[in-house]
Amino acid sequence: MSTYDVIIAGGGIIGGSIAFELAKEKLRVAVIDRQQPGLEASWAAAGMLSGAPESPDSIPLAPLAKASLEIYPEYVAAVEEASGRPTGYRRDGTVMALFLPHVERELSTILAVHHGLGFATEAVRVEDARQMEPALNPAMRAAAWLPYEGRVDSRALTEAVLQAAEKQGVEILARPGGVKSLAVEKNRCTGVATGEEKISAGKVIIAAGCFSGTIPTIERYAPTRPVRGQIVALQAEKVKLERVVRSEKGYLVPQANGRILAGSTSENAGFEKRVTPAGMQQILAAAVEIVPELAQASVVETWSGLRPDTPDHLPSLGPTDIEGLLIATGHYRNGILLAPITTRLMREWVIQRKTSMTVDAFSPMRFSQHSAVAG
Ligand SMILES: Cc1cc2nc3c(=O)[nH]c(=O)nc-3n(C[C@H](O)[C@H](O)[C@H](O)COP(=O)(O)OP(=O)(O)OC[C@H]3O[C@@H](n4cnc5c(N)ncnc54)[C@H](O)[C@@H]3O)c2cc1C
């Protein structure tokens, strides 16, 4: 039977990044995936690094998001150096373009919330927003500038992370069915079983995205469920966007190859990855509202992916009450943004058994405690 210091179930951005980090600490690490890694949510993501909360649900994430934005440059530099591949990382801010009635009130609420959390969001005049991004619709009613936000090419980053991990000595094992069960002896996790073999390890980290909750025992710590998001990639010779632009209804993310990603939907559709006419209609209407000239763009690709959501929409991070079993999943809409800080926290838990920031709100134990109370 093979033996590792750490086994990670799931080779998306989260599992891949943790593996790379732990291998740098000279640990013997294996990533087990049920297919070729890197082809689920991390492949589908738009790549926005948007720290500021989008809704009241995501306010508790703000300290993690800020910490992750801060260390993004060093995270990307390490990945690019080890893999020799670019990741499309840019920290060039986001323009928020608001179209709905009563936007003044909406904008002052957004500013108050962002400032209260320490995000330097500024109100800008519509004319100034259009100077930054001339393609924007002059009919927008108000605008804001979020200079601290960034973007990355999620596919390029995920591939680079997995390559960096392999170059650092991580073994990437694609096994049909992936991790099927945990080996637990006397309340200690001693490894995993795939359909084919048992693999033992000092520690097991579950990072299987929205599929995490389908692994027996894990639902107690990470009751993940998939939330489908669709994306349309557009190409338009005449439209130049320098930065991410978001409205109340959608977003546009420019990529280095000239494509503009337009997103997204948020659907409870089980594990079914599909692009639908209704989804396309919603995304394209929002895209054309933000930049009217996109009505003439070419649709060059469409896809969908499954965000790993949890009941409180917050990630499940850290140790469990089974010795040696840790969780790193449930990043929902923000897994690309949160990969660096998740990686740092997991390294701290594995190596030092404590973290440099307070993250109790994300403990995997909150779900099992709730179910115990509810009976
Ligand atoms: C349309 C869309 C747009 C998004 N845009 C953004 C964005 O702009 N910014 C942002 O920060 N986030 C965004 N997200 C969210 C982000 O993509 C996710 O939070 C992040 O990719 C989660 O990464 P992960 O590694 O946890 O999961 P995944 O990338 O889903 O990886 C999980 C891996 O686990 C494997 N697996 C499954 N079951 C098993 C098993 N039993 N054993 C072993 N392996 C298993 C899978 O095959 C997969 O490779 C978006 C998501 C979607 C769908």
Image (cartoon, rainbow, N blue to C red):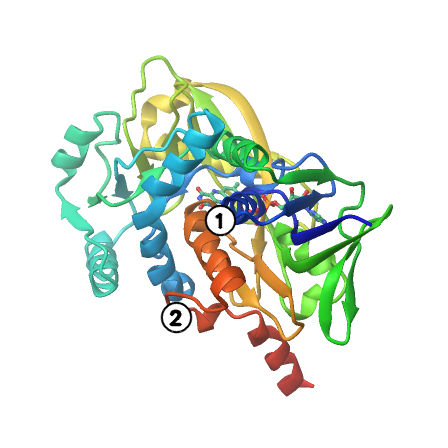
Query: What is the quadrant of the C terminus in the image?
Result: bottom right
- The residue carrying mark 1 is 335
Residue 358 disc label: 2
Q: Is residue 245 left or right of residue 307?
A: left
Amino acid type, residue under disc 2 in the picture: Thr
Where disc 1 sits, the SS reads helix
Tell me if I can see residue 246 in this picture.
no
Percent position (x, y) of residue 1?
A: 83, 50
280 in relation to 179, above or below: above
Q: Alpha-carbon neighbours of circle 1 within 10 Å: few (<14), some, or many (≥20)?
A: many
Residue at 48% x, 41% y is: 264
Q: Is residue 200 left or right of residue 20?
A: right
Amino acid type, residue under disc 1 in the picture: Gly
Residue at 70% x, 45% y is: 32
Residue at 15% x, 29% y is: 131
322 in relation to 303, above or below: below
Quadrant where ligand 1 appears:
top right
Residue at 46% x, 31% y is: 82
Q: Nearer the viewer, residue 102 or 279?
A: 279
Q: Nearer the viewer, mark 1 or mark 2?
A: 2
Percent position (x, y) of residue 265?
A: 52, 44
89 in relation to 322, above or below: above
Q: Alpha-carbon neighbours of circle 2 within 10 Å: few (<14), some, or many (≥20)?
A: few
72 in relation to 284, above or below: below
Q: Nearer the viewer, residue 287 or 271?
A: 271
Confirm or reject: label 1 Cβ below 8 Å from ligand 1: yes
Residue 280 location, quadrant: top right
* Sequence-first tag of 1 and 2: 1
Q: Extreme top residue here?
A: 237
Tell me if I can see residue 355 in this picture.
yes
